[in-house]
Image: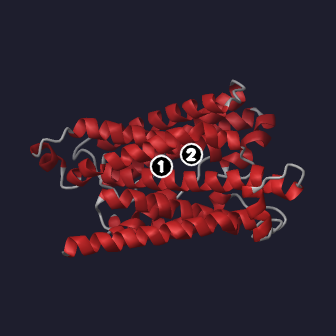
Amino acid sequence: MRFTRLNGWRAAGLAIGTVMLLICLMASLLFGAKNYSWPTVWESLVHYDEQSKDQIIIRTTRLPRALIAAAIGASLAVAGALMQTLTRNPLASPSVFGVNAGASFFVVCAAILLSVSNMHALMWISFLGAAIAAVIVYVLGSAGRGGLTPLKMILAGAAMTALFASFTQGILALDKQGLSTVLYWLTGTIAGRSPEMLETIFPYMAGAWAAAWLLAKGLNVLTLGEDTAKGLGQRTILLKLAVGAIVVVLAGGSVAIAGPIGFIGIVVPHLSRYIAGIDHRWLIPYCAVCGAILLLAADICARFIMIPEEMPVGVMTAVIGAPFFMYIARRGLLK
């Protein structure tokens, strides 16, 4: 009875979160450098008129932007939750462990040095960069006495983030023309993204979300400890490889579209665990919904900080996430 009641509360919370997500999506369509009325937005969605300038802006600019923000927020949050479970590290996330930095470096190299502009090609290059960074950090964090520890993973991630960031800056310093092309993207932004970008990346993200949820039971067992999981017959190596592949797809896809947006993968999993608990069957959907809400809210706020200019959403997430990161670091590593 208690378990059924708990699941009922979780389902109610998820429903409330879904409603809040829809509200944020609508707010993203309504508010910006120019505010639109609800009837105008509704007409652009239901009775699209290609002769109306306002409807064109809503349909081709604001709607893709809102959907991309929701997809990226959900992806980064789910990736962060998976990484925290896999590494048993409360500070694990794609931005902290160098995954975003690796993907960014590979994308910059492809765009600047090889003149690659095809979104599908950049997406796979971003996947490759994210995978290489993740493997290096995992190997460095596992080396030496004591094996894999949270502190060693943090240090390895910080080192790789700094290394890839330096490489990226070096590439841009050699090509000042390329600097103007990717500088805004490197701050983390979803402004000006086309519907085609979302169409290219969304099937991979959706597949990764589904795969993460299907692995939820295995992740629940893994939280009991690797020895316990093996004793229960779980193939921990295959599970870790599958989770790693999902993280690469989610983080690499996000970077390919919006650049290295940080801290979503740290803040949201902790918030979701506080609400939904540690059961990954609920934690993963909560992370997806809360991550989408947070990035949408950050993007909406970024539109009003420097009117008529817009602040990159990556700056807003850093303002939100940096204090939380320090709080978790003190509580999780320094106690």
**Colour scheme of the rendered structure:** secondary structure
Residue at (82% x, 62% y) in the render:
309
Toward the left, the furthest residue is: 231
Q: Which residue is mark 1?
A: 94
Q: Which amino acid type is marked by label 2? A: Ser
Given residues 117 and 161, the one toward you in this image is: 117
* Quadrant of the frame with the C terminus: bottom left
Above or below for 324 versus 66: below
Residue 114 in which image quadrant: top right
Q: Which mark is residue 280?
A: none
Q: Which amino acid type is marked by label 1? A: Pro
Q: Where residue 163 sits in the image (x, y, percent)?
A: 53, 41
Q: Which residue is mark 2?
A: 254
Answer with left or right where residue 60 lies relative to residue 94. Answer: right
Answer with left or right where residue 275 lies relative to residue 250. Answer: left
Residue at (12% x, 41% y) in the render:
233
Answer with left or right where residue 128 lies relative to residue 179. Answer: left
Figure label count:
2
Residue at (73% x, 49% y) in the render:
184
Q: Badge 1: how crowded within 10 Å, few (<14), some, or many (20+)?
A: many
Q: Sequence-wise, which precedes: disc 2 or disc 1?
A: 1
Q: Where residue 220 sits in the image (x, y, percent)?
A: 24, 54
Residue 28 in which image quadrant: bottom right
Q: What kind of element bears circle 2?
A: helix
Q: What kind of element bears circle 1?
A: loop
Residue at (37% x, 51% y) in the render:
82
Q: Badge 2: how crowded within 10 Å, few (<14), some, or many (20+)?
A: many
Q: Is residue 62 visible?
A: yes
Q: Are marks 2 and 1 in contact (CB under 8 Å)?
A: yes
Q: Where residue 73 sits in the image (x, y, percent)?
A: 54, 56
Question: How far apart, in angstroms, are the residues tagged by discs 2 and 1?
Answer: 10 Å
Above or below for 185 versus 116: below
